[in-house]
Amino acid sequence: MADLLPPLKPIPIKERLSILYIEHGHLDVLDGAFAVVDKNGVRTHIPVGGVACLILEPGTRVSHAACALAARVGTLLVWIGEAGVRLYSAG
């Protein structure tokens, strides 16, 4: 079965937003883009491939689809501790 969509072409790093912090929210994929839903239910869309690094602070949940999309478009995911004191994981 052939793919219906052409392969994604990553946006050059110099044209991306460097870092975006996410705290106490849920990172998921909606309509092919990252979507963050905060604790109040407010949804914010993040352009796919428009951010070089998403820093995930405590209280953030990440779906498998969001991790897969980040890998496809070259967005680094970094899990950190409270106030950025510890680095737990990156991928």
Image (spheres, helix red, strand yellow):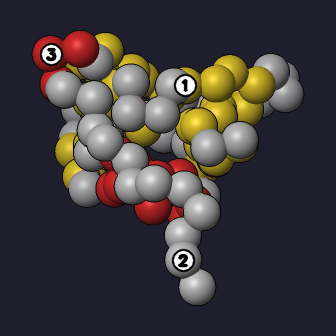
Q: Nearer the viewer, mark 3 or mark 1?
A: 3
Label 2 crowd bin: few (<14), some (14–19), many (20+), radius 10 Å: few
**Does the rendering let one see residue 25?**
no
Residue 31: % across, % down:
71, 41
Kindly identify which residue carries mark 2.
Answer: 2
Numbered circle sitting on residue 55: none
Numbered circle sitting on residue 14: 3
In three-dimensional space, the C-alpha distance between marks 3 and 1, rounded to whole angstroms, equals 17 Å
The amino acid on which the numbered mark 3 sits, given as a three-letter code, is Lys
Q: Nearer the viewer, mark 1 or mark 2?
A: 2
3 and 1 marks in contact (CB < 8 Å): no
Label 1 crowd bin: few (<14), some (14–19), many (20+), radius 10 Å: some
Residue at 72%, 32% in the rendered image: 37
Residue 19: % across, % down:
30, 20
Residue at 28%, 18% in the rendered image: 16
Label 3: which secondary element: helix
Residue 52: % across, % down:
26, 29
Numbered circle sitting on residue 46: 1
Label 1: which secondary element: strand
Q: Is residue 32 above or below residue 11?
A: below
The amino acid on which the numbered mark 1 sits, given as a three-letter code, is Ile
Instruction: From the viewer's perspective, tell me whether residue 79 is left or right of residue 14.
Output: right
Instruction: From the viewer's perspective, tell me whether residue 41 is left or right of residue 27.
Output: right
* Quarter of the view holding residue 87: top left
Q: Which comes sooner in the sequence, label 1 or label 2?
A: 2
